[in-house]
Image (cartoon, helix red, strand yellow):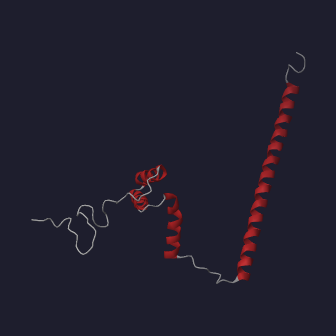
Amino acid sequence: MESTENTVYEGTPRRSKRCSGRYGADFGRKGSWTGYNIAAMVLGFVFFWPVGLVILYWIIRGRDVRDLPAAAREKWSAMFGRTDRSGGNIVFEEYQQTQYDRIREIKEEIKERSRRFAEFREDAQRRADQEEFNRFMSSSPAANGQ
């Protein structure tokens, strides 16, 4: 009696039952098994096991873990979407960009003032310390020659 396991029907390729189907012999071979990906997967399992599963799935699909954040952001925006609230109005977008630039300049100015004030305080503290030191030295008995 002949086994039907390896029989070819109407031009179909030979497959054994063990290696056939979606998860056959090539399962996981397509994966991108780099050291970086494996480390990310292990850390994902250590910190929160669902993250490890997502990373494992991502690797098995043959993709690099470094592409995962961008893909997740893209999916998130597609599902819960950031819609273009400006409606494509070029004038409004230019106004908005101008305001963002102005805010950035104000933040930089505040940082610069903060830095200069910190320097001023350091100088004032140094002058106060020098003055205190000079008073101590002038009042010490060794300074009077004794």
**Occupied quadrant, residue 142:** top right
Task: Please identify the residue farthest to the left as the structure is shown.
Answer: 1
Q: In the shown orientation, is residue 41 left or right of residue 121?
A: left
**Occupied quadrant, residue 56:** bottom left
Viewer-closest of 87 and 106: 87
Q: Residue at x 49, y 71 (%)?
A: 75
Look at the picture and state if 78 lies above or below 72: below
**Occupied quadrant, residue 13:** bottom left
Look at the picture and state if 46 lies above or below 50: above
Q: Position of residue 90 (x, y in %)?
A: 71, 82
Q: In the shown orientation, is residue 55 left or right of residue 92?
A: left
Look at the picture and state if 45 lies above or below 129: below
Q: Position of residue 21 (x, y in %)?
A: 29, 67
Q: Residue at x 46, y 50 (%)?
A: 39
Q: Position of residue 45 (x, y in %)?
A: 40, 53
The quarter of the image holding the C terminus is top right
Viewer-closest of 2 and 137: 2
Q: In the shown orientation, is residue 31 left or right of residue 101?
A: left
The quarter of the image holding the N terminus is bottom left
Look at the picture and state if 61 lies above or below 137: below
Q: Residue at x 31, y 59 (%)?
A: 25
Task: Please identify the residue farthest to the top as the structure is shown.
Answer: 146
